[in-house]
Amino acid sequence: MSREISAGVLLRVAYEGTEFHGWASQKGARTVQEALLGAVRAIDDGVRGVRGASRTDAGVHAEWQLASFDTGRRLEARAWALAINQHLPDDVAVRAACDAPIGFNPRFAAHNKLYRYRLLIDPVRDPLQRKVAWRIGRGIDLALLEREARGIVGERDFAAFRSASDERENTVRHVRRVEVERSSDTRIVSIAVEGSGFMHNMVRIIVGTLVDVATGRLAEGAIARGLETRDRRVLGTTAPAQGLTLERIDLRASEEGNQVGAWWPDSAP
């Protein structure tokens, strides 16, 4: 039943991206946006659309995607989260919800995103890691990888670090942090990349280039050469999608001082 719009809702959404063709709706493809919209419309069929903060690619996972919608139903935030989850498949879930202004779009309010890429350093395949990590079967120099990663941090022109399909004119981005972290499982190395925003495949190209340098496929300094020449050809491979997870999105306060999304519970609703 269609209702007059009376409220906005903001959701924190997690998904295992293996069986999805990315976040954004595509004709004839299973996407997170369409799955979420279908679940929301099961509660309020007047909802026109769901607005996401980040267009993750096919196979990419998320712990902290943000999505908003406008509704004519008045429910408590916790009730929205629990009700939507009843209509979602097992590989996507609403982890938290809060009230938002009508028309709120998290894409334009996001000022910081954190992605994490997982590497499995193991000469033998591990079936339990195949959907969440990129296996590197040959020797890798992690000290060299960390040294190469230092050249990424800062506000720079990352024109070379995007897919051919990304034709946007503004290619300057501020990467605040690139950190290589070792897990308690010594085979697992993660690369955290945090910044103001990213172009299509940018994080995966960064990681692929770092791995190519650290395994000897590319000479040290590839990151610097890419930044200087703005030429995608001097960089490395695009790392596979399954190792990448959108770990967090931070929202800025609005000009009116609205703090929507500034606080989230750590546990499920």
Image: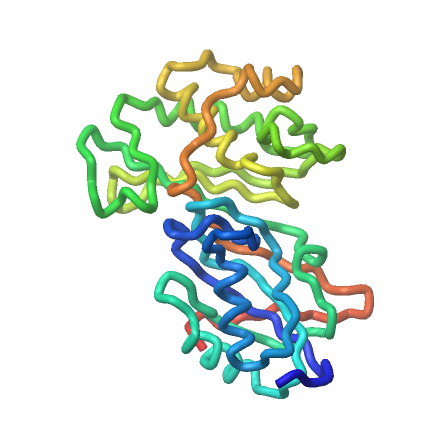
Task: Give the position of the C terminus as an image quadrant.
Answer: bottom left
Compared to residue 51, the image places residue 218 above or below, namely: above
Structure colour scheme: rainbow
| Residue drawn 75% across the image and 33% down it | 169
Outermost residue toward the top? 219
Observer-nearest residue: 163 or 192? Answer: 163
Quadrant location of residue 213?
Answer: top left
Q: Is residue 60 left or right of residue 131?
A: right
Task: Give the position of the N terminus as an image quadrant.
Answer: bottom right
Outermost residue toward the right? 255
Compared to residue 52, the image places residue 183 above or below, namely: above
User: Residue 128 location, x and y as percent?
Assistant: 22, 47
- Looking at the image, how many numbered discs can be counted on the residues? 0
Outermost residue toward the left? 124
Compared to residue 28, the image places residue 98 above or below, namely: below
Quadrant location of residue 177?
Answer: top right
| Residue drawn 53% across the image and 58% down it | 65
Compared to residue 53, the image places residue 159 above or below, namely: above
User: Residue 222 location, x and y as percent?
Assistant: 53, 17
| Residue drawn 58% across the image and 81% down it | 44
User: Residue 105 location, x and y as percent?
Assistant: 69, 62
Observer-nearest residue: 33 or 131? Answer: 33
Outermost residue toward the front? 28
Q: Is residue 26 left or right of residue 47?
A: left
Q: Is residue 91 left or right of residue 253?
A: left
